[in-house]
Image (cartoon, helix red, strand yellow):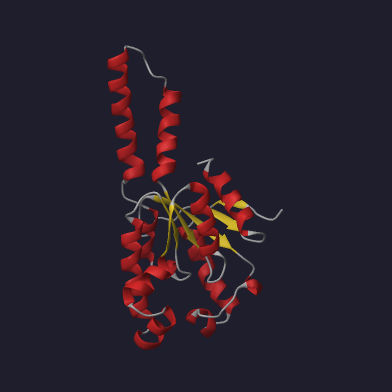
Amino acid sequence: MAYKMVKTNKVDFEHGSITKNILQTALPMLAAQARRAAELFTGEAIPDRRLEEVLSGLTAQVRNVVLIGMPGCGKSAVGRALARRLGKEFADLDFLIAERAGKSIPDIFAQEGEDAFRALETQIVREAGARTGCVLSAGGGVVTREENYAPLHQNGVIVHLRRDVSLLPTAGRPVSQSTDLRELWRRRAPLYAAFADLTADNAGTIEDAADQIIKELEKL
C-alpha cells in the first residue's frame, strides 16, 4: 500500500491547547440559528441529520489543511495539488517568510541566525493560521516551537506528510545541510506526531498523496 493514513493522539501543550474557534463554536451556532429561523418560516421541522450535513459542508469549506513534515518531503507540491482539488487558496509559509524578510531563507540563516528565522516564522504562522479555507505548507522546523501549534490548529486539521529520509533533498535547506537527516528525523518525529491530526506516507505520486488525504478529510 503506497499511503497509510492514521489518526494520532493529540498532545495538549502547556501553552498550546486549542482555544474555542470558528470551527467549534461559530459555525454550529450559526447553523442552529438558521435551522430555527427556517423552521419558524416554513412550519416544518428540519431533522438533525440534515443540519449535520449542512454543518459538515460548511466546516469543510472554511477549514484549513496544514501540511507539516521533514524538509523536502513534498509539502509544497502536495499542498498545491490539494488546494487545486479542494478549491482552496494555497500558501507556502516559507515563501511568505522570505517575502517578508526580503531575502531567501538560506540568507536569513546565514545573516541573522536560526533564532531570528524562527521568530519571523512564528509571526507568519500566527497570521496564516488566522485565515480560513486555505491549504498551508509549513516549514520543516515549525514544530520546534510549541507556540506554533495553536495558531496552526485553530482553524484547521494538521497532516504530517512523511517520506523516506533517503529521498529527502537538502539543497537550499540550511538545517538539512548542517545536520544528519536521520538524526534530524529522530529529534523531530515525536514533535510531528504531537502536532498532527493525520499522518500520510508520501511514497507515490503527488496526485495520489492528495487524493488519499482528501479521502481521509472527508471522514472527519
Residue 34: quarter of image:
top left
Is 55 rendered above or below residue 209?
Answer: above
Residue shown at the point (34%, 34%) measured from the top left = 28
Q: Where is residue 111 in the image (x, y as percent from the top left)?
A: 36, 88
Residue 204: quarter of image:
bottom right
Q: Position of residue 2 (x, y in %)?
A: 69, 56
**Horizontal side, residue 180 vs residue 105: left or right:** right
**Horizontal side, residue 24 vs residue 205: left or right:** left
**Horizontal side, residue 144 vs residue 193: left or right:** left
**Horizontal side, residue 70 vs residue 126: left or right:** right
Residue shown at the point (40%, 38%) measured from the top left = 58
Residue that protrudes farthest toward the right in the picture? 1
Q: Where is residue 191 in the image (x, y as percent from the top left)?
A: 48, 65
Q: Nearer the viewer, residue 117 or 150?
A: 117
The answer to whether residue 116 is seen in the rendering is: yes
Q: Position of residue 180 (x, y in %)?
A: 57, 81
Residue that protrudes farthest toward the top in the picture? 43
Residue shown at the point (42%, 23%) measured from the top left = 48
Is 1 rendered above or below residue 173?
Answer: above
Q: Nearer the viewer, residue 37 or 103?
A: 103
Residue shown at the point (45%, 71%) measured from the top left = 141
Is 217 rendered above or below residue 110?
Answer: above
Q: Nearer the viewer, residue 159 or 75?
A: 75
Q: How many marks?
A: 0
The answer to whether residue 197 is seen in the rendering is: no
